Amino acid sequence: MIFSKILKKFILFFIFFSLNATAAKEVLDKIAVIVGDGVVLESQFNFKFNRYIQEFSKQNPNQPLPPESFLKKQILENLIIEELLFQKAKKFGVRISDQELNDYMERLASSNNLSLDEFINKVSTEGDFQDFRKDLRNNLIIQRVQRGLVRPKVFISDQEIKNYIGSTDGQNSILVEYKINQILVKSKNLADEVYQKLSDGKNFNELKKEYDESNDDEIPKWQKISELPSLFNIAKDMQIDDFSEALKSGAGYYLIKLEDKKGDTVKIEKQDLVRHILVQTSEIRSDKQAEELIKEIKDRVIAGEEFRVLARLYSDDPGSKLDGGNLGWSTSDKYDPTFKKVIDESNLNMVSDVFKSSFGFHILEVMDRREKDVSSELQKDKAFRIIFERKYEEQLERTLQELRAESYVDIKIKI
């Protein structure tokens, strides 16, 4: 199994940074394996085997090679699987366009801190660039076939995501740190009294000076959940500036406040609550008529008619007209650039001037603004990706084994 993982690593290395067996295409060849409707040639096998030995020796000069018989079996099996996947690609009509290939090469160049031209020059100094493009395209085709075969078999429940986020492994991967303030009192009655004052808007630090019995004057410091008492684990579900109810412990009753948090999955998003009315041009309404209608609607709003009623009557936005033009809470970044600009420049509860976006003519009103902690959604997204990658690899292994087992394979060479 260890050798198998090593082998996979090097085979991937060859795909991206070496040229394939195309150099041997003029050599008289023999069939190494009959695979379904296709074949693996001896030249392909010999090229992969020799290239693996060269690269392994270059990168591990002091490490002995895995047993030759093992290497040959593993390389041959990889070639068989590759051929089966290409046959699936042909059956499913999987293709990689030139634009997709160019985009991928740009990302590959960027990941190696190179411009695209520098990357092309580097590849060209090591071999034929067109052969490299062909190998890269083939690898992307294989990846797409694998995803098509495996993704429908990977299921992740909400409970799995929740369990992972709460686990030690999850906390180490997500890396969120919290700054928590605390008040300790000895009796439940006193804890309830403090909680009520917090609910009434009293300042946490002032109440701490008045009630805290912990003699802890230390300024709150950054800590991971794993570094906090288990009683404080609720912090991971709290929003910044939230405070807890009384938490019973052996020392008394704690009330905690989440002062701040940080990490790659921590994000405080500025959101706007917006409603709008859209009037579009059509076969029976010219651009000028649409603009005149939206101006008339604005005048009626200013004169005192209900915005939401006029939105239901006149708006051409099917997604919001039944809600009186209400678009719900969102960041302005998600909208058309012109629409975003008007939102950002609008005062609260003021109807905007008429403006034109790529959708048509609008008026809008920003009804409220807020800062929303969307960290929990980012954490769920990251947890999902981590779990998916693990499950995907496990399912991919099983799927490839099943594909190999159900396919016709006749090995012609001795290894």
Image: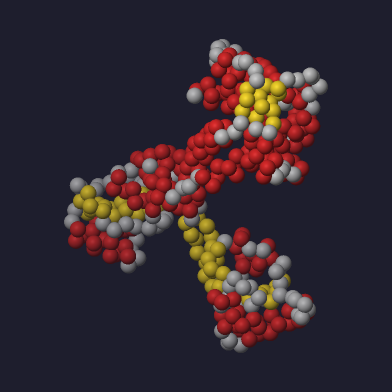
Query: Horizontal and vertical percent for residue 107?
Result: 68, 39
In this rendering, would 28 be left or right of 264?
right
Work out whether residue 217 or residue 377 is closer to the camera in this orientation and state it. 377
For the point 75% across and 20% down, the residue is 29
Query: Horizontal and vertical percent for residue 140?
Result: 67, 38
Residue 326 picture quarter: bottom right
Query: Relative to 117, is 323 above or below?
Result: below
For the point 32% across and 67% down, the residue is 200
Residue 364 in sight from this viewpoint: no
Residue 362 picture quarter: bottom right
- All told, the count of numbered labels is 0
- Colouring rule applied to residues: secondary structure
For the point 19% across and 47% down, the residue is 250
Query: Relative to 7, is 191 above or below?
Result: below
Residue 358 in sight from this viewpoint: yes
Query: Horizontal and vertical percent for residue 119?
Result: 74, 32
Work out whether residue 322 or residue 187 is closer to the camera in this orientation and state it. 322
Query: Relative to 95, is 329 above or below?
Result: below
Work out whether residue 152 or residue 63 is closer to the camera in this orientation and state it. 152
The quadrant the C terminus occupies is: top right
For the point 70% across and 22% down, the residue is 31
Query: Relative to 165, is 211 above or below?
Result: below
In this rendering, would 6 be left or right of 41?
left
Residue 177 picture quarter: top left
Query: Horizontal and vertical percent for residue 125?
Result: 78, 25
In the image, farthest residue toward the right: 26
